[in-house]
Amino acid sequence: MATIWYLESNSPAQLKPKPAPDNLPLQLLEVEQNEYQYNRFLYQLVGTAWSWTDKSSWSDKQWQDYVNSPQLRTWVLYYAGAPAGYFELHKENEQVEIRYFGLSEQFLGQSLGGYLLTQAIQQAWQWQAKRVWVHTCDTDHPSALANYQGRGLCIYKTETD
């Protein structure tokens, strides 16, 4: 049984930003040329450690439809040229969901999560959102919930599944 927390922000002023760690070769880029294989790679790179399985049986066509949706945007955090983490934003009716978010295992514990989440929230607000939301569960990284709350997101619903 898993506990799922739903968190939200209703104002950009709620954001408690965390800067990038000093002197690291970081670059955050939006994926502007959709390549469904790259989104699938990122999903597996980050999600395997946390047993993300909701898209593991998807066909190429399902991935193509998902990635090519105008409601989806993807950003990748690179560390010295290697993908260190990513986030996907999904917009629906002026609400932006941080749909997938995380770091690859190699980059955990380097104080990158707070910075990457700050960027995700900022990008969501820049996409003319009136609300930014995300969900996490107790099978995600042990610091996930604290990171979301540390960036100013507030729990609005809790479920057990």
Image (spheres, rainbow, N blue to C red):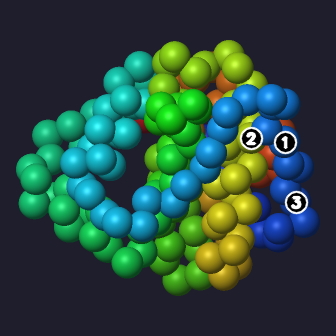
Residue 18 disc label: 1
The residue under the point 79% across, 38% down is 20
Looking at the rendered image, the disc whose residue lies closer to the viewer, 3 or 1, is: 1
Q: Are marks 2 and 1 in contact (CB under 8 Å)?
A: yes
What type is the residue that disc 3 sits on? Gln
Q: Secondary structure at mark 3?
A: helix
157 vs 151, left or right, is: left
> Which quarter of the rendered picture does the N terminus lie within?
top left
Question: Quick one: label 1, few (<14), some, or many (20+) residues within 10 Å?
Answer: some
Q: Residue 155 placed where, x, y %?
A: 73, 48
Q: Residue 122 placed where, x, y %?
A: 73, 62
Mark 3–mark 1 Cα distance, whole angstroms, equals 13 Å
Q: Secondary structure at mark 1?
A: loop
Location of residue 49 with respect to 39 vertically, above or below: above
Residue 91 disc label: none
What type is the residue that disc 2 sits on? Tyr
The residue under the point 49% across, 18% down is 105
Is any part of residue 41 visible from this angle? Answer: yes
Question: Quick one: label 3, few (<14), some, or many (20+) residues within 10 Å?
Answer: few
Mark 2–mark 3 Cα distance, whole angstroms, equals 15 Å
151 vs 85, left or right, is: right
What type is the residue that disc 1 sits on? Lys
The residue under the point 15% across, 47% down is 58
Q: Nearer the viewer, residue 158 or 124?
A: 124
Q: Residue 12 placed where, x, y %?
A: 83, 68
Q: Secondary structure at mark 2?
A: helix
* Residue, disc 3: 14
Q: Nearer the viewer, residue 58 or 23?
A: 23
* Residue, disc 2: 115
Q: Residue 55 placed where, x, y %?
A: 25, 44
The mark total stands at 3
Is any part of residue 2 visible from this angle? Answer: no
